[in-house]
Amino acid sequence: QVQLVESGGGLVQAGGSLRLSCAASGSGFSIMGWYRQAPRKQRELVATITSGGQTNYADSVKGRFTISRDNVKNTVYLQMGSLTPEDTAVYYCYGNVRRGRWYDYWGQGTQVTVSS
């Protein structure tokens, strides 16, 4: 049973930083990443990273957030800086793995709240 477990969310003041971590119980993930969902909004991509280290960011977080991963620890990180209240959301870890066919996995989510 593959599980993704996020940690590192919390309350931070605008302009501050937070680091999210997501530990996967399995291995062999192709793409791992982070999505977020704010109240009354759809879930949106924040950043993804391939097993080879290629990254992709939403325009709204470019230059402020950095995604990284440790393939040995099966962990993906999201370093968030210059946070604004618009970054307030539940952040979900994502990973996909091919075992015959592609499987998508999601974490349970971690709340990030940025106060003004």
Image (cartoon, rainbow, N blue to C red):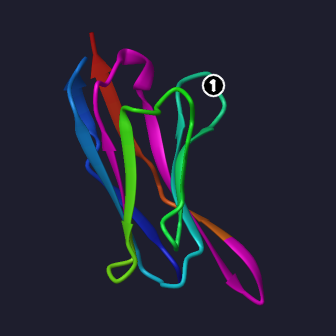
Dominant secondary structure, magenta: strand
Q: Residue 64, relative to residue 39: is it above or below?
A: below
| SS for dot 1 | loop
Q: Which residues are magenta?
A: 76-103
Q: Residue 20, relative to residue 14: is it above or below?
A: below
**Is the C terminus in the top left, top right, bottom left or bottom right quadrant?**
top left
Q: x, y percentage for residue 16? A: 20, 26
Q: x, y percentage for residue 12? A: 21, 27
Residue furthest to the right in view is 101
- Look at 52% across and 26% down and name the residue there: 60
Residue 44 picture quarter: top right
- Look at 52% across and 39% down and name the residue there: 36
Q: Relative to residue 115, is residue 93 drawn left or right?
A: right
Q: Residue 41, relative to residue 85: is it above or below?
A: below
Q: Relative to residue 107, is residue 75 drawn left or right?
A: left
Q: x, y percentage for residue 10? A: 25, 37
Q: Residue 105, relative to residue 48: is it above or below?
A: below
Counting other residues with Cα less than 10 Å from the Cα at mark 1, is it few (<14), some (14-19), or many (20 or more)? few
Residue 104 picture quarter: bottom right
Q: Which residue is mark 1?
A: 41
Q: Relative to residue 45, is residue 72 drawn left or right?
A: left
Q: How many marks?
A: 1
In reply to whether residue 54 is colored magenta, the answer given is no
- Look at 28% across and 32% down and name the residue there: 81
Q: x, y percentage for residue 56? A: 56, 48
Q: Tell me the amino acid under the disc marked 1.
A: Lys
Residue furthest to the top in view is 116
- Look at 52% across and 73% down and name the residue there: 51
